[in-house]
Amino acid sequence: MKKSLHNERVIITGASSGIGKEMAIEVAARGGEPVLLARSVDKLEHLSRHIYENTGVKAPYYKLDVTSSTAIKSTFNHIFKEAAKPTTLINNAGFAIFDYAENATEKDIEDMFRVNVFGTIACTQAAIPYMKENNYGQVIFIASLAGKMATPKASVYSATKHAVLGFANALRMEMKETPVHVSVVNPGPVRTNFFQTADSTGDYEKNVEKMMLEPDYVSSKIVKLVVKPKREINLPGWMGTGAKLYQLFPGVVEKLAGKRLNRK
């Protein structure tokens, strides 16, 4: 039986599609209120209406480009000054463009860092003071197993997710004496529109088809953290084990699994 999220108000960045959309639906289905943030107002409006029609839960939405620190501060100030205070922030906004390091364009590199890293940090900075003031809160970072085990053509994306992991781990220690919990989720490949931007050739998606996770499964695992926080979860578990082995024996793993790692 799914535990209720009654009285939980969950901010979700990148809520208009993919895992973000599924998490919003899952939060509402469990009785919580998702607060939807993304750049596409039309998609957010449609999702908010869908959630209300199917659950009776009102899901407020706000247009937000996480590359704008000014917009982040303004939006979060508005949200946290409402009567119902948010209890959780899920930093989900992010994207990838797969390419060899020598071919990565300056724009693609900057854009990935602005969204995946700088935007994540800015949203967290905007939320933490209010959470400490309210004496309750949680920040969930959607990182990636790519942040633990880099692969060819994902050098920049892996670097951004490695940065997210580093930031989250340090933040967790900084929040040790506060009521704010910090969790990290590291998914492997998930069947979403993520790959339409990451790999326009479609080759990678075909190569990892058999190991792809369904977005509703991933979102369910993430939303469970709202009720029962954990330090970190890796999805799927066997990939998390592989990442740990790589950290212990990188040379051995690269030698034995080199071809399997080069699927892009």
Image (tube, grey):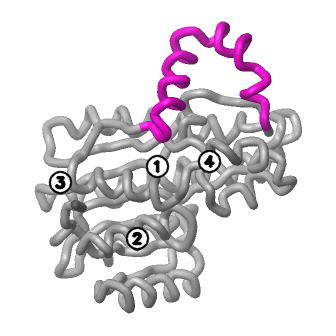
Q: Which mark is residue 132?
A: 3
What kind of residue is marked 1? Ile
Q: Type of residue at label 4?
A: Met
Q: Nearer the viewer, mark 4 or mark 1?
A: 4
Please tell me which residue lies in front, 139 or 214.
Answer: 214
Q: How far is mark 1 from mark 3, CA to CA?
A: 21 Å
- Residue 253 sits inside the magenta stretch: yes
Of residue 51 and residue 213, the one placed in the foreground of this image is: 213
Q: Amino acid at mark 3?
A: Lys
Answer few, some or many: residues within 10 Å of disc 3's Cα (few below 14, many 20 plus, some between 14 and 19).
some
For label 1, the residue is: 142
Magenta residues span: 234-263
- The amino acid type, in three-letter code, at marker 2 is Ala
Q: Residue at x 68, y 50 (%)?
A: 96
Q: Residue at x 54, y 47 (%)?
A: 117
Image-quadrant location for residue 253: top right
User: Sequence order check: which comes first, mark 4 or mark 2?
Assistant: 2
Q: Secondary structure at mark 4?
A: loop
Distance in Å between CA atoms under marks 4 and 1 = 17 Å
Is residue 74 something that shows in the picture? no
Residue ID for mark 4: 212
Q: Quadrant of the N terminus?
A: bottom left
On the image, numbered disc 2 is attached to which residue?
Answer: 24
